[in-house]
Amino acid sequence: MSDQPERIPQHRHCLGCGKAFVGDGEFCGIECKGSAGADAKKKIRRLALIWLAIVGATVVIAAIYYTAQGS
C-alpha cells in the first residue's frame, strides 16, 4: 500500500436524502426532488400556522387588556 490516502471522486450530496451522487443538480433523483418539495410545503404551512397563532394570541391579550382598562 502507498502512503497516499484514497481519493474520493468529485461528488455532491442530495438535498433530499443526503446521499452522495455524481452529476449535476441538487437532487439524486426525481423521487427526492418531489419529496423535498412536499417537505418544504409542510414547513411553510407549519410556520404560517405558528405565525397566525402568535398574532391571534396578541390580539386576544390586547383585547382583554384594553377591555379591563375601560372598566
Image (cartoon, helix red, strand yellow):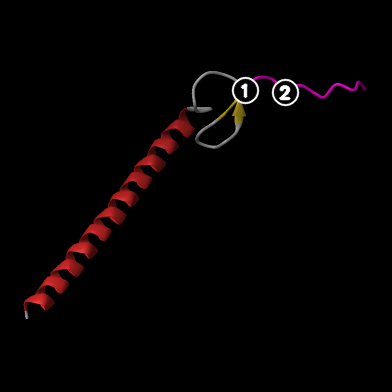
Left or right, residue 60 beside residue 33: left
Q: Which residues are magenta?
A: 1-10
Q: Residue at x 50, y 36 (%)?
A: 16
Q: Residue at x 33, y 50 (%)?
A: 47
Q: Which residue is mark 1?
A: 11
Could you tell me residue 25's position as x and y percent?
49, 22
Q: Which residue is mark 2?
A: 8
Q: Quarter of the image containing the C terminus?
A: bottom left
Left or right, residue 41 beside residue 57: right
Q: Could you say which is closer to the camera, residue 51 or residue 34?
A: 51
**Element carrying mark 1:** loop
Could you tell me residue 54's position as x and y percent?
27, 59
Mark 2 touches mark 1? (CB < 8 Å): yes
The CA span between labels 2 and 1 is 8 Å
Vertical comparison of 61 with 4: above or below:
below
Taking the view exactly as shown, the residue that stands out farthest to the bottom is 71
**Element carrying mark 2:** loop
Q: Quarter of the image containing the N terminus?
A: top right
Q: Could you say which is closer to the camera, residue 67 or residue 40?
A: 67
Q: Amino acid at mark 1?
A: His
Was residue 9 drawn as part of the magenta stretch in this picture? yes
Q: Main secondary structure of the magenta part?
A: loop
Vertical comparison of 53 with 20: above or below:
below
